[in-house]
Image (cartoon, rainbow, N blue to C red):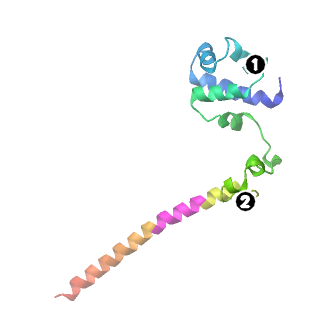
Amino acid sequence: MSEDLRQLRAVMRQAISACRMSSRNIETAMGLGHGALERILDGRNDIRVRHILGLARLLKVPPQDFLELGVLQPEAGTKYRLKDWIMPREMAPPDAAKTTADPGEDVAKLVREAVQQTLGAELKEAVREAVRKELDGKGSKAKP
């Protein structure tokens, strides 16, 4: 059995166990012959994309979850994203040019902007309320 796919098989086995369906029902739902699921999970049969897609459909989860959890990737091993190679520029997202930026920085920026917008709106309202109170207070003091 390929070491590269051992973790993927383990993730698939955990997902199958968590769904609490019988192997026979899962095989039927995935369009597999009886006994095929165990052969896939123990490495006697190859994992095919259709197996991952079928299991994801059955569990109602995105198929990429299996790859993200089941295929170990070295952190510094990738320099590019596939979309950088195959996606035409006009279809690329506006910030696709920033391929070397840290994704954590993008998330932090989005969170910072959201907090600033929320606080900005709350601060404006608080200032308006304070000014209203101040004006109402001065108006009532001016009239004896």
Residue 94 x %, y %? 66, 59
Indicate the position of residue 46 as horizontal and vertical percent values.
Answer: 78, 22
Q: Which residue is mark 1?
A: 42
Marks 2,1: beta carbons within 8 A? no
Q: Is residue 85 above or below residue 111?
A: above
Image: magenta residue range: 110-120
**x and y, in percent, of residue 140 in the image:** 21, 83
Q: Which mark is residue 98?
A: 2
Who comes first in sequence, dot 2 or dot 1? 1
Q: Secondary structure at mark 2?
A: loop
- Residue drawn 47% across the image and 63% down it: 118
Q: Residues within 10 Å of mark 2 (few under 14, many from 20)?
A: few
The image quadrant of residue 138 is: bottom left
Residue depicted at x 81% and y 49%: 76
Mark 1 belongs to which amino acid?
Asp
Residue lying at the far left of the rendered structure: 144
Residue 85 in the image: state x and y as whole percent: 78, 49
Question: Quarter of the image containing the C terminus?
Answer: bottom left
Between marks 2 and 1, how big is the CA–CA gap?
A: 41 Å
User: Can see residue 91?
Assistant: yes
